[in-house]
Amino acid sequence: MEQQLHTPEGVRDICNIECGKKLSLENRLHKVLQLYGYHDIQTPTFEYFDVFRKEIGTIPSRELYKFFDKEGNTLVLRPDITPSIARAAATLFKDEDIPIRLCYTGNTFVNHSSYQGRLRENTQMGAELIGVDSIEADAEMLAMVADCLTTIGLRDFQLSVGNVDLFQSLIEDAALNEEEEERVRELINNRNYFGLEEYLDGIQVKRSSKEALVALGDLYGGVEILAQARNFAPNSKGIKAVRRLEQIYDMLKYYGAEQYIQFDFSMSGTYGYYTGIIFRGYTFGTGDAVVKGGRYDHLLEKFGKESPSIGFALVIDELMSALTRQHIRITYSRKNTLILYDKGMEKKAIRIASDFREKCKNTELLRKAPDKTLEDYMQYGKEYYAGNMIYIQEDDQIQMFNLVTGETKTINTKE
């Protein structure tokens, strides 16, 4: 008996209706990005290791899928598409000084050992606005995310927005070294504020810095939280960070998107390349963010072009999960016509199918098996979103079934 091959842990097959719904979802989201003037780009699934090296600020090296080419170069499957876009933009648009809007769809791969039941391969759709550092650009990104989520039927979601510049100003004021900063980030990301207070006491951080860092856990809420955050800002860098968020919020009122915004100053960013505003999108029915984004003004410099930029990625698999659990129907309008025929009626069946296809109608040909009933094929059609079934019988009778309304019609025909 042959051994059955299964997929590796963290990846899975997607087929039939689920795959159709996923592609339909991607098409609707892609349309929103195009409505905002974004142009498509495709980058390779694997890149040189250097594109995702530690200095770039993406995920740790141990979580990359690494392999070698024939020349011995280390290659990696992309864990994140933004550095790939940054590399491509720095090369392809090296001399461009007008803002560039790019969008993409692709799969990412993270070899995370502690992913309990979570996928290691994810489909992401994202947008990058390259070459502009402005409040307008930040607001456009957030408004576009809100548009994407409402377009696919989500209503109960929120965009948590922070600014890493405030966090960085607190780190600088506390005079933490690199190792101490990493530990503080880890404790804050885990929302372990008791542990944070204990750690800061242990390394003898001054009281004002300790109080401000510990207070980050409470700096979460609506626009009213910004005044409170300004009080904790230790210097002009921190004050500017809060002020920028106030201006972005005002700009979002023009889009009608301010209702989805919450502020969260405990966010320090999953990726080290974030430099200013960062945000995450959350909704019910999923344990992780459905959107991740932020500003990365120095990332393109690593690839040879000075260019402030901002972007986001929609995690398609998480969105699918959320929509399913919220009982929001994913529009999937594909309606095949099934042409079922008896043995010996191949010529007529193929002729009718060809005629339908010329009229851009999806048509599936099935020869009737002796051990299956008409009801079996009708059930099959309903399961796979067929709209109609035509049964060509060996006596030249043709039966037509509307699988949606249940109506039937019989006609006699001769060659």
Image: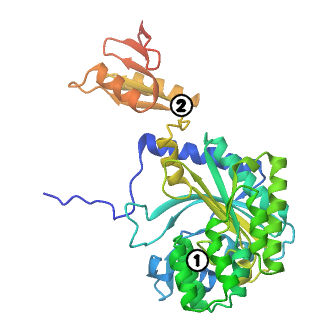
On the image, which quarter does residue 227 sit in?
bottom right
Percent x, y of residue 221? 68, 57
> Is there any visible trace of residue 46 in the rendered image?
no
Residue picked out by circle 1: 58
**What amino acid is found at the position of numbered circle 1 in the picture?**
Thr
Q: Residues within 10 Å of mark 2 (few under 14, many from 20)?
A: few
14 sits left or right of 125 in the view: left
Q: Residues within 10 Å of mark 1 (few under 14, many from 20)?
A: some
Q: Quadrant of the C terminus?
A: top left
Percent x, y of residue 311? 70, 64
Image height of 371 relative to 56, above or below: above
387 sits left or right of 275 in the view: left
Image height of 298 relative to 381, above or below: below
Percent x, y of residue 318? 51, 53
Residue picked out by circle 2: 357
> Is there any visible trace of residue 181 in the rendered image?
yes
On the image, which quarter does residue 390 sit in?
top left
At x 57%, y 55%, the residue is 290
Q: Residue furthest front?
A: 207
Q: Quadrant of the N terminus?
A: bottom left
Mark 2 or mark 1, which has the lower sequence index?
1
**What amino acid is found at the position of numbered circle 2 in the picture?**
Arg
Viewer-proximal residue among 328 and 193: 193
Secondary-structure class at tag 2:
helix
